[in-house]
Image (cartoon, helix red, strand yellow):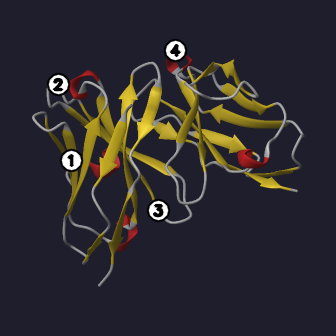
Amino acid sequence: HVQLVQSGAEVKKPGASVKVSCKASGYTFTDYYMHWVRQAPGQGLEWMGWINPNSGGTNYGQKFQGRVTMTRDTSISAAYMELSSLGSDDTAVYYCSRGHYAWGLDYWGQGTLVTVSS
Amino acid sequence: EIVLTQSPGTLSLSPGERATLSCRASQSVNSNYLAWYQQKPGQAPRLLIYGASSRATGIPDRFSGSGSGTDFSLTISRLEPEDFAVYSCQQYGSSPLTFGQGTKLEIK
């Protein structure tokens, strides 16, 4: 069965960077895009971007352009999301999610809480 | 960017009642690529409906989606206790993908 397992919670200081991992299993990793979505405390879902694990191509939301980098390692079926220049408004749960052009985001990781605090 | 507006913000109903949630897009959603997600506290979202009206794998048939273009809805025919949660719509037909702000379905 499909599983997306994310790395553990992080606490970072303002201005630092964070890198979250997402390890996929139960399907062919390169057959589906991997999306990243975040959710600030008490707020709605916010799409950050996707990576095509096959080609490595990416598409980032304009809000995150220049600050986010999505990568993958096909040898271990893992995707990564790195966010730099962290501010307090980056405190959120970050999710990876498998995406299909017609089915939407059908499987989600368990989420990784990133707390930005001095 | 397509803005999705959900209504109502909060819906108070009792188990056994019918729930209808609305999602309106600021412009037409390509190929009706509109999804609905359910989210419970401390959990990741769960895909319920994709393509505006197709149920995802394992989703009970009391959940149904309808609509096209700019107006979409999610209906839960008879509410079960486990259905009380936050529901979000999302369009994935054009970039950037966008979500509605969510509707909280609470027990009356």
- Residue located farthest toward the front when viewing the structure as drawn: A1
Q: Which amino acid does label 1 sit on?
A: Tyr
Find residue B101 and report its horizontal and vertical position in percent. Answer: 60, 49
User: Which residue is the site of mark 3?
Assistant: A40
Q: Rounded to the nearest whole Å, what is the CA distance between mark 4 and mark 2?
A: 25 Å
Q: Rounded to the nearest whole Å, what is the CA distance between mark 4 and mark 3?
A: 30 Å
The verdict on a common chain for dots 4 and 2 is no
Mark 2: give few (<14), some (14-19) or many (20+) Cα within 10 Å. Answer: some
Indicate the secondary structure of the residue bearing disc 3: loop
Q: Which amino acid does label 3 sit on?
A: Ala
Q: Residue A80 carries which label?
A: 1
Find residue B26 and report its horizontal and vertical position in percent. Answer: 59, 33
Indicate the secondary structure of the residue bearing disc 2: loop
Vertical arrangement, residue B8 with respect to residue A29, above or below: below
Circles 4 and 3, Cβ within 8 Å, touching? The answer is: no
Among the two numbered marks 3 and 2 on one chain, the one whose residue lies closer to the N terminus: 3
User: Which residue is the site of mark 4?
Assistant: B31
Circles 4 and 2, Cβ within 8 Å, touching? The answer is: no
Q: Rounded to the nearest whole Å, what is the CA distance between mark 1 and mark 4?
A: 30 Å
Q: Nearer the viewer, mark 3 or mark 1?
A: 1
User: Which residue is the site of mark 2?
Assistant: A54
Mark 4: give few (<14), some (14-19) or many (20+) Cα within 10 Å. Answer: some
The verdict on a common chain for dots 1 and 4 is no
